Amino acid sequence: MSQASSKFTDTSVQVSRRHVSGKLWLAIFQVATLIGVVALTVLLLTILNDSFGYVAVENKVDPDSLAVNGIPLDAQDKENLVQTLRGNISAGLYARFERDQPFAERDEANVYALIQEFVISPRILESWTLYDSLFIREQISETLERDFPNAELQFRNWLSWNFVRAQQSSYPEIAGVRTAILGSLWTIAIAIAFSLPVGVGAAVYLQEYAQDNQINRIIQTNINNLAGVPSIIYGMLGLAIFVRAFGLFTSGIAFGAVDPATANGRTILSAGLTLGLLVLPLIIINAQEAIKAVPNSLREASFGLGATRWETIWAHVLPNALPGILTGSILAVSRAIGETAPLIVIGASTFIQVDPSGPFSKFTTLPIQIFQWTTRPQGAYHHLAAAASLVLLVMLLTLNATAILLRNRSRRSY
C-alpha cells in the first residue's frame, strides 16, 4: 500500500513539473511575441512622430503678392502661371527651362512647382516633431518670436498628396517621391517578370523531373546557400554581368534606344534583373516546398488515367501548388522592394528629377531616396525620410494584399 502511494506521489510530482515547464515555455513565447509587437509599435510611432509637426517657414516672395486680378496663385491657369514665372525670374533661367522642356509641353502642376521653387522659394528654418508640436506648443511659439521673427509657423503634414506626386528637389519644402515611386515599380515589375517564371520552372524540374544523383544534390545545396548570401554580393554580380558584360543590351544601344545619359548600362533593366537574381533562390525554395506539399495521390490518379508527366504537372500539381508559390513570391517581393545595397552598387541615382520612361532609363528607388535623405544633416530631410517610409510601407502592403487576394482565389480544398 505504501509503495503504491509512493508511486502515485512520484507521478503527481512529475505531472506537476511538466505543467510548470509548459507554463514556463508559454511565458517565454508570449514575451517573444510581446517584444516583436513592441518593436513594431515603436517603429511605427517613430515614423509617425517625424511625419507631422510644426515648421517655421520663411518665403522669399509672399504668394499673396503673385495674385492676378484677385485670383490666388494656386487657382490660376497655365497661361497666367507662365507669365508670373517669366516676370519673376531672369531671362537666362527662363530660357533654360524652355530648353529643358518647352512650356507648351508642361502642365499647370509643373509650372506651379517651378514658381514654388524659384520665385516663392520657401525655406524651412526650423521643424518640430509631432510630440513636440502637441506638448510644447508655447515653447515653440517663444522660439519662433525670438529666433525667427519673419517666419510663419505652420503645421505641416509631410505625407501629403503633393509629396507623393512631386519630383525630387534640392529644397525639402517642395521635394517629393514621384520619381522614386515610379523607379521602385519599374524595378520590381522587371524583377518579378524575370524571377517568377525562372524560379517556378527550376522548382518544377528539381521536384518533378530531376533524379536523385550527386549533381542535382549539389545544385540543390547551392540554391539553399544562395538564399543566405548578402545582398551586396548580388549587387557586385549584377554590376559585373548586367552593367559591364551585357551593357550593350541593358543600356538599350543594341535595340536602338540609345540615351547618352544611360549608355553605361546603369539602367532600370540592370537593377530589375539584379533584384530578380536576389530573390530567385527564395522563389525556387518556396515553390519546391509548395509542389512537394501536393498529395502524391493526385499524381498517381492522373498517371492511372493515362496522363503524361507534363499533363499531370500542368493540370494538377501547379494549380494545387499555386497558393504556396504565391506565398513565397510575397516574401520575395517584400525583400526586393526594400533593398538598397545592390542598387547602390548597380548605380542608382541619388538625385534625379526625370521620371523613368522605360527599362533603359536612369532610376532611383524609394529605399535609395530614404537613405539619401537620412544622411543629410538638415532636420527637414529627416521628416521627408519618415514620410517616404510610410509611402514605402503602403506600397509594400498593397503589393502583399494583391498577392494574398490572388492566393486565396486560387486556393483549393478537398
Image: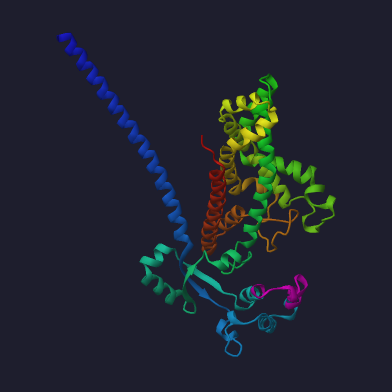
Quadrant hosting residue 257: bottom right
Question: Residue 207 in the image: x percent, y percent?
Answer: 64, 28
Q: Nearer the viewer, residue 310 or 244?
A: 310
**Residue under the image location 55 percent in, 30 percent down:** 293
**Residue under the image location 47 percent in, 56 percent down:** 47
Image position of 375 (left or right of 236): left
Question: Residue 310 in the image: x percent, y percent?
Answer: 70, 31
Residue lying at the far bottom in this picture: please name it.
Answer: 69
Q: Check if residue 47 falls in the magenta segment.
A: no
**Residue under the image location 65 percent in, 40 percent down:** 278
Q: Is any part of residue 345 visible from this angle? A: no
Quadrant hosting residue 321: top right
Q: Nearer the viewer, residue 201 or 189?
A: 201
Q: Nearer the viewer, residue 219 or 230?
A: 219
Relative height, residue 407 to residue 208 (above, below): below
How many numbered callouts? Answer: 0
**Residue under the image location 68 percent in, 40 percent down:** 197
Question: Residue 16 in the image: x percent, y percent?
Answer: 25, 24
Quadrant hosting residue 256: bottom right
Question: Residue 224 in the image: x percent, y percent?
Answer: 61, 30
Image position of 380 (left or right of 86): left
Q: Is any part of residue 133 visible from this angle? A: yes
Relative height, residue 230 to residue 145 (above, below): above
Magenta region: which residues?
Answer: 94-110
Image position of 364 (left or right of 149): right
Q: Magenta segment, principal secondary structure?
A: helix
Image position of 359 (left or right of 180): right
